[in-house]
Image (cartoon, rainbow, N blue to C red):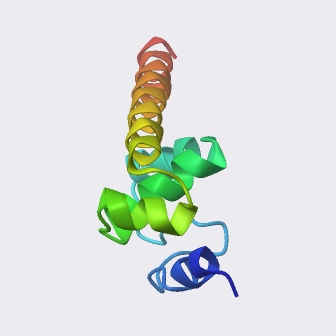
Amino acid sequence: MSLVGGLVDDLPADVSSDGVPADAGAERGELLVVIARLPERQRLALFLRYYADLDYRTIASILAVRPGTVASSLAAAHATLRDLLEGSQGERVRG
């Protein structure tokens, strides 16, 4: 089992098989769908930073990259999430 696989195994029990928490509201479910669209390195960096609460140096060690790469991956993930979520909110208002 890989380290990342082990971390994913530690997800809360209320997460369904499709990865969406059983009690998630529409916004949280939408966020998870958008996160799933991110490139793998960005998804892993987000997970390790915000779910596992690891620092950049530890994440860099796990992903075998430099801490600066972790920072740029997180910045890119934040920008992509912002763009995708703002776009979906606009669609919701228009629709």
> Looking at the rendering, in which quadrant would you find the N terminus?
bottom right
The number of numbered discs placed on residues in the rendered structure image is 0
| Residue 69 visible in rendering | yes
Residue 54: x and y in percent read 32, 68
Q: Is residue 23 above or below residue 81?
A: below
Q: Is residue 53 above or below residue 82?
A: below
Q: Residue furthest front?
A: 66
Residue 16: x and y in percent read 59, 75
Q: Is residue 72 above or below residue 20?
A: above
What residue sits 45% from the left and 59% below the top? 60
What residue sits 50% from the left and 18% below the top? 91
Write down the quadrant of residue 38 in the picture: top right
What residue sits 66% from the left and 66% below the top? 18
What residue sits 38% from the left and 67% below the top? 58
Residue 59: x and y in percent read 42, 63
Q: Residue furthest right?
A: 1
